[in-house]
Image (spheres, helix red, strand yellow):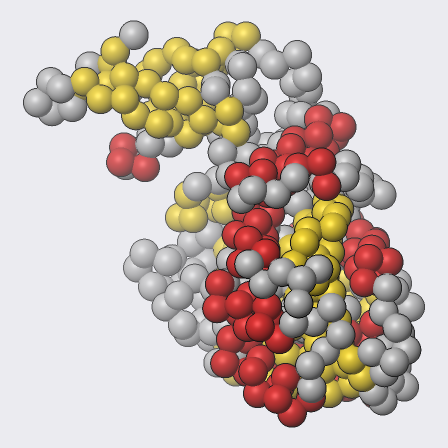
Amino acid sequence: MTLKYNENTFEVTIDKLNDRGVGMTSIRRENKRGKVKKEKITIPYTLPGEEVKATLLPPYKKKIARLDEIKEAHPDRIDPACPHFGRCGGCTWQHWPYESQLNQKTSMVKNYIEEKGFNPDLVKDTIPAESEWNYRNKMEFTFAPDGSLGLHELFNYRQIIPLETCLIASQPIVDVTLEIANWVKRHRISGYDKEKHEGVMRHVLVRHSRSTDEMLVAIFATESAPEKVKELIATIEEKFPNVKGLLWIKNTNLADSVHADEEELLLGRDYIFDTLAGFRYRLWWDTFFQTNPVQAERLVELAIEMAEPKADEKMIDLFCGVGTFSLPFAKHVKELAGIEIVDTSIQSARRNAKDNDIDNTLFYTSDARRGLAKVVESFGIPNLFLLDPPRSGAGGKVMRRIGRAQPDRVVYVSCNPKSFAEDIKELAQFGYRLEQVQPVDLFPQTYHVELVALMSRVEE
């Protein structure tokens, strides 16, 4: 079947899932000049092998289509639990049983490392989450121009889906968020319009500690807190005594991101306490911390098991953040140096080490690529290297610096198997062998998968 230039609705079979876990297919379509071209099309909320009816959405250059009808469903397809599924971008796999999600994540990791020349048999089955639902300890919600509060529509950051529930967030997060949304609606406070750059309310960020039950709430707006916020403060004090911090943050930045020009503490303190792997951490609104604490503890356990740290060894923790891996590892090694570009995170890591009576750590605020050589020069060549980079990965230059430092073992914690495979390819040329890869599911109902891997130096 070939679509005419002005035709947008078609029937097709889904070929595969792309890097974001979304259904992909191809269609033949005429262009303005009548020439037929093959186009790759993305159709969200579909599964491989399904026969579907879909309609291309403008702007057509993005090649994204809306699922109109499932002609023949995948045998594993199930009904989604959330009423927002199919529009909300928070989850994309609720139409798939959890076991199928886990199998797909294992296959994804295997495919990525096999593409780079590594043995896929080194990849173990993905470790499932303790719970498929209500696992997130942090959420960010966005206001629409009409003042409604919710999450972005999939592939459309201009559209906000008003929140009724969120099945991947902890229930206390949902409850306090709805309270804020009702207060905004009741007082008819405008939301921020990202196109016109006008309006007041922008975002709500909520943290919830599973270990202490403390909550931190940050409200972002283009103006300072109004007098009527006193009503909201009183309501939160009465209904949510576990909210230990309530912040009003002025953000006039044109970019659609959480940002602070000014911070006003409306209630309590500006941080909460949480624990991970037996260590206590202070968390501010902008602190990076694993959003699934139960599975994050498993990541730490796996990293220690693979690394086999020894009491006479030196270790470097690159992209150390607030010390999530640094503190547990510090108990097993002689000395540990942590490197992180965000200075507030380094200050937190130092404070967290002090709070936990750890005195064998050094933390450096530095860019990973430029700072690594200086740290190695002053700290010494480590026996053990751990890195937990952002989704973009560490990059070739950083990996080559690690390779030239020649540590005995490298433990790589990754939130993106594709960039992980690209990074470890760089290490292989320095005499490192991939020993094992263990995927861990921190984000059920989504395509995201984390992993812990060990590489050992086998050549001088």
The location of residue 215, given as percent across then percent down, is 77, 66
Residue 408 to residue 168: above or below: below
Task: Quadrant for residue 167, please give it.
Answer: top right
Q: Position of residue 291 (x, y in %)?
A: 71, 57
Q: Tell whether 432 sits left or right of 274.
A: left
* Residue 246 visible in the current orientation: no
In the displayed structure, 87 sits above or below 443; it is above
- Could you tell me which residue is drawn at 73 percent across and 65 percent down? 409
The image position of residue 195, as x and y in percent, is 32, 56
> Foreground: 251 or 443?
443
Say which quadrant the C terminus sits in: bottom right
Outermost residue to the front? 460
Residue shown at 65%/72% (left/top)?
A: 406
Please give the name of the residue rendered at 61% of the width and 89% of the height, measured from the top-left corner. Answer: 377
Q: Position of residue 204 (x, y in %)?
A: 59, 62
Query: Image check: 370 left or right of 388?
Result: left
When the figure is inspected, residue 45 is found, relative to residue 309, above or below; the finding is: above
